[in-house]
Image: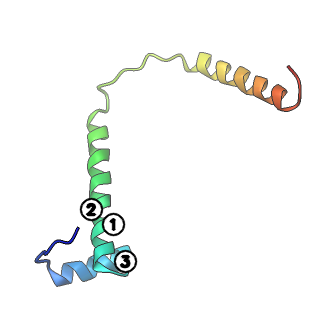
Amino acid sequence: MRTTLDLNEKLIRELMTVTAAKTKTEAIHQAAAEMIRRKKLDQLKSLSGTIHLDLDWKRLEQAEIRHQAVLKRRRHGHH
C-alpha cells in the first residue's frame, strides 16, 4: 500500500541504522512489527497473576516420561 507521510529525516536515518534496514520502507516495517510485538507482550504481562492453573507438575512430568518411553520403544520396533 502506498502512503505519503511527513517523517523526521533524522529519526528515519537513525531507525535505518539501528535496524540495519537497507530502505526506509524496510525500517518502517521492522519498527511497526516490533511495536506490535511489544504491545502484545505488554498485554500478556498485564494478565500476570490473573490466571491460576492448578497443575500437578510431578504427575505431568511422569506422564511425559512414560509417553517418551512408549515412543522410544516404538522407534526401536517394540510394541
What residue does disc 3 label? 21
Q: Is residue 39 above or below residue 56?
A: below
Looking at the rendered structure, the secondary structure element under dot 3 is loop
- Earlier in the chain: of badge 3 and badge 1, it is 3
| Residue 20 image position (x, y, % from top left) | 39, 77
The three-letter amino acid code for the residue at tag 2 is Ala
Q: Do the numbered discs 3 and 1 sit on residues whose CB atoms are within 8 Å?
A: yes
* Lateral position of residue 8 relative to residue 62, left or right: left
Tell me the residue at 72%/20% (across/down).
66
Q: Is residue 2 above or below residue 32?
A: below
| Residue 73 image position (x, y, % from top left) | 84, 26
The three-letter amino acid code for the residue at tag 1 is Gln
Disc 1 to disc 2, C-alpha distance: 5 Å
Disc 2 to disc 3, C-alpha distance: 13 Å
Tell me the residue at 26%/41% (across/down).
43
* Lateral position of residue 31 relative to residue 54, left or right: left
Tell me the residue at 28%/33% (across/down).
47
Q: Which mark is residue 6?
A: none
From the viewer's side, name the closer residue of 22 and 15.
22
| Residue 22 image position (x, y, % from top left) | 37, 81
What residue does disc 2 label? 32
